[in-house]
Image (cartoon, rainbow, N blue to C red):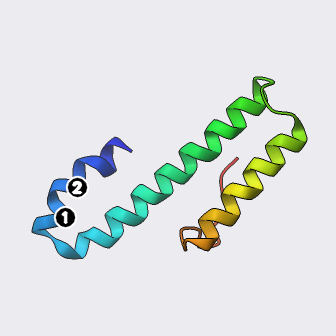
Amino acid sequence: MDEVLSLLPLVDALPTLADRVFTRLADCLAEAVIHEIRSRHEHGELSRAGYLTEICQVVVELQARGLLDGRAIEP
């Protein structure tokens, strides 16, 4: 995430970089959300059903916004 954020000042200077930076930033944020849900489940804060429900909701929302391109999400 830090690496992606450090590239933001270059977006103005290199407009062709903007799409790649946005895509990578969206990937990082999606991974962070999924990791947070998984961590809550592992710490007993979410039941298995709650975990699966939240993961499914996140995936649906990412797909609806065109932010999930079918690549596997790492466990």
Which amino acid does the dot numbered 1 rest on? Val
Q: Quadrant of the N terminus?
A: top left
Give the number of the disc on residue 11: 1
Q: Residue furthest top?
A: 43
> Which picture quadrant has residue 2?
top left
Q: Residues within 10 Å of mark 2 (few under 14, many from 20)?
A: some
Q: Residue at x 77, y 32 (%)?
A: 41
Residue under numbered circle 2: 8
Q: Quadrant of residue 16?
A: bottom left
Left or right: 25 in relation to 30: left
Looking at the image, is 11 positioned above or below residue 37?
Answer: below
- Real-space Cα distance between discs 1 and 2? 5 Å
Residue in the image at 83% along x and 48% along y: 52
Residue 49 location in percent, x, y?
89, 43
Which percent across, then down, holds residue 68?
59, 68
Image position, residue 10 (x, y; %): 15, 60
Q: Amino acid at mark 2?
A: Leu
